[in-house]
Amino acid sequence: MKTVCIDTGVLSLLFSSNPTKPVQELLKWIQAGDIHAMIPKPVLIEAFLNICRLQGKEIAKIAILNFIAKYPIEMVEFDNDLLILAGQLKCQHRLSLSYIDCMGIALALSRKAAFHTTEKRLKIIPHNVLSKLKVVKYTF
């Protein structure tokens, strides 16, 4: 089974007033069990923040709780190895990558999963670790 790691940007597209077709299809495959999806738990915090800013905390709460209930996505807590890998990525790319990006990339690399994101800067970051990352991009 194909494994993917989902970034905040993909959730932002899902929670938008007009989710894109590629995001809708991805979530349909996840819901059907055709794709195993993972997400670092802090990504949900960032998604909550983004929704809260636009629509308020009640809407954000409902959206996040409905998402968790509807989709069989593995919400990943970080063990020591993931913590160190994410920390090394942030140290090496502190100006280019956010903490959340580093967490998602570390998870995707460690589980050999495709990283589903809206992040545009990943491929311009010079580093051999990132060259091993399979990236699937979505646009707004």
Image (spheres, rainbow, N blue to C red):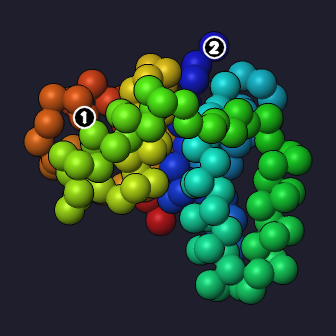
Question: Taking 48 as reference, is 105 left or right?
Answer: left
Res. 122 visible in picture: no
Residue occupying image coordinates x 57% and y 64%:
46
User: Residue 56: which numbered mark, if any?
Assistant: none
Q: Identify the image quadrant of the N terminus.
A: top right
Please state the horizontal and vertical placement of residue 103, each as a whole percent of the image. Answer: 45, 44
State how far apart marks 2 and 1 are (Cα).
23 Å
What residue is shown with label 2?
A: 1
Q: In this view, which residue lies farthest toward the top?
A: 1
**Quarter location, residue 30:** top right
**Type of the residue with mark 1:** Leu
**On the image, numbered disc 1 is attached to which residue?**
130
Q: Is residue 64 left or right of residue 124?
A: right
**Residue situated furthest left in the rendering:** 126
Q: Is residue 101 visible?
A: yes
* Image coords of residue 102 (percent x, y): 38, 46
At a point 27% along the width and 40% down the height, the residue shown is 88
> Which residue is more in the foreground, 47 or 82?
82
Q: Looking at the picture, does residue 92 appear above or below residue 58?
A: above
Against 6, residue 33 (above or below) is: above
Residue 49 picture location, percent across and down: 62, 73
Residue 84 on image: x %, y %: 37, 35
Front residue (pair 45, 87):
87
Instruction: Check whether the beta carbons of the residues at disc 2 and disc 1 lie within 8 A of each other.
Output: no
